[in-house]
Amino acid sequence: MTRLIKTTVLCAIMALVSQFAQAQSPLDGIFKASERAQKAEEARGKYKVEANKSITMTKVFDGLNMDAKKGLEVASQYIEEAYQLCRFSIDVVNDEKNFVIAKGTFENFETYSFIPHEYIFNAPITIRFDAKEGRLRMMAILTTYEGTRMMHNDYSPFSENISELPPVNENSTEKKKMYTKVFVTLFNKVQELFDEAEAFIQSHNGIEVDEDW
């Protein structure tokens, strides 16, 4: 009987320890906010705020075994087939200057609760590929957060300029915690997009075989 009681007590203690281990410490939120602020600071040198208040991020793919015409063809094919992170539609193709522009939207890429509201974020994005001999440059252009602000059964759309909000605008303190989290998520989405494009481009970077041999 004594042994059974000891075993029961031990199991209860282990269960409580497990619950405390899985429970989120009040300090976790502080640590996560600090981590997001650090990531936002690390991202600062990887984007540019343009005169029109848009934000651009750039990735250059070097050492490609393709001329400008082939590069433009591959970039256009990527745009037409991209679907994992964002669907795009081609807006402009310039065969003389070897560039292509497309538009899409990161839909529902982040949500945030800011009592009494719940926010759902979308981000329209424009991408541009410029092709040269053996090189492709990809630019991601972002201007606004578009989304929905909800409170109970009330839904209202919103549109806000990214460059005017934290952490891009260091002087702004408006909902700093929320916008820092949202921007870090958006920045990571663009980096994933660059990685996705690079994988596609490299998969089409082989040597074309002359069939007339």
Image (cartoon, rainbow, N blue to C red):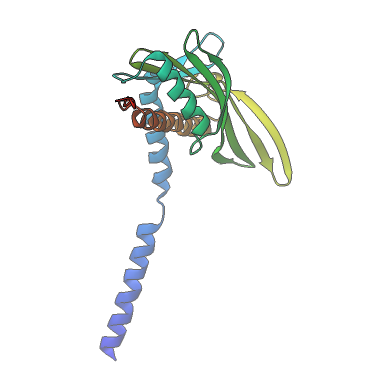
- In front here: 156 or 95? 95
Measuring from the top left, give residue 95's x and y in whole percent.
Answer: 50, 12
Please identify the residue farthest to the bottom as the structure is shown.
1
Classify 103 as above or below 114.
above
Count of numbered badges drawn on the protein: 0
- In front here: 169 or 10? 169
- Residue located 49% across and 24% down the image: 76
Measuring from the top left, give residue 164's x and y in whole percent.
Answer: 55, 19
Looking at the image, residue 195 sits to the left or right of residue 164; the answer is left
The answer to whether residue 138 shows anywhere in this view is no
Classify 134 as above or below 108.
above
- Residue located 37% across and 67% down the image: 16
Question: In terms of image quadrants, where is residue 115?
Answer: top right
Classify 75 as above or below 130.
below
Question: In terms of image quadrants, where is residue 190?
Answer: top left
Looking at the image, residue 209 sits to the left or right of residue 51; the answer is left
Question: In terms of image quadrants, where is residue 2?
Answer: bottom left
Measuring from the top left, give residue 187's x and y in whole percent.
Answer: 44, 29
The answer to whether residue 108 shows anywhere in this view is yes
Measuring from the top left, give residue 92's x and y in whole percent.
Answer: 57, 16
Please identify the residue farthest to the left as the structure is shown.
3
- In front here: 88 or 193? 88
Name the quadrant of the N terminus. Answer: bottom left
Please identify the residue farthest to the right as the structure is shown.
154
Looking at the image, residue 198 sits to the left or right of residue 126; the answer is left
- In front here: 56 or 202? 202
Name the quadrant of the C terminus. Answer: top left
